[in-house]
Image: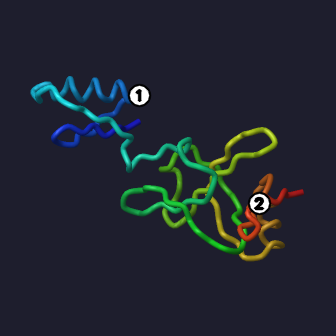
Amino acid sequence: MKYQITYTAVYYVNADNEDNALDLAMEQHSELPDGGWEVIRDPYESPLESLQDGTYSLTVLDRAPYLVSRTEGFWVAYKPVEAIDDVIDGTYLGVWTDPDDGKRYYDMTVHIETLDYALAKAKEWDQKAIWDIANNKAIPVN
């Protein structure tokens, strides 16, 4: 994971966790005087696990996910992803936690206006459920 280390300037380092990121930055930049170092997660790298349930769009330039706000229609997942970089530009990333078993799903997702078509596509793509935006709930696919 990437972390942003801030002192009098910003440095980017690759590390397994915040402590390792801070140690690495301090080691590589030991010429800086002692002081208040700060570690925060790189705002341009958002691991899937950090995302809440919802549907996200990714900007072309920085790939930072932001929640999509819609008031009607249905979100239908069609292809699982393992990382943000797996999401193709111009598509959406859906994050859903199955309430039955707590498993989280990360998928490329499309917006479909009608229930019948959304259910038909979900069956074709072998999905467990679709998301009803207006009613804010999952609809199981039988």
**In this rendering, position of residue 67 left or right of residue 29:** right
Q: What residue did someone put label 1 on?
A: 16
Residue visible at 82% across and 66% down in the picture: 119
Residue 39, above or below 130: above
Q: Secondary structure at mark 2?
A: strand
Front label number (1 vs 2): 2
Residue 86, above or below 24: below
Residue 27, above or below 117: above
Measuring from the top left, give residue 54's x and y in whole percent. Answer: 62, 57
**89 or 8, nearer to the observer:** 8
**In this rendering, position of residue 133 left or right of residue 124:** left
**In this rendering, position of residue 135 left or right of residue 64:** right
**In this rendering, position of residue 53 left or right of residue 9:** right
Measuring from the top left, give residue 139's x and y in whole percent. Answer: 82, 60
Residue visible at 75% across and 46% down in the picture: 98
Q: What residue did someone put label 2 on?
A: 137
Residue visible at 85% across and 58% down in the picture: 141
Question: Quarter of the image holding residue 92?
Answer: bottom right
Question: Quarter of the image holding residue 2?
Answer: top left
**Quarter that holds the N terminus:** top left
Residue 97, above or below 137: above
Measuring from the top left, give residue 48's x and y in whole percent. Answer: 54, 45
Q: Name the residue furthest front.
A: 36
Measuring from the top left, give residue 45's x and y in whole percent. Answer: 41, 46
Label 1 amino acid?
Answer: Asp
User: Could you tell me if the residues under marks 1 and 2 are in contact, i.e. CB atoms within 8 Å?
Assistant: no
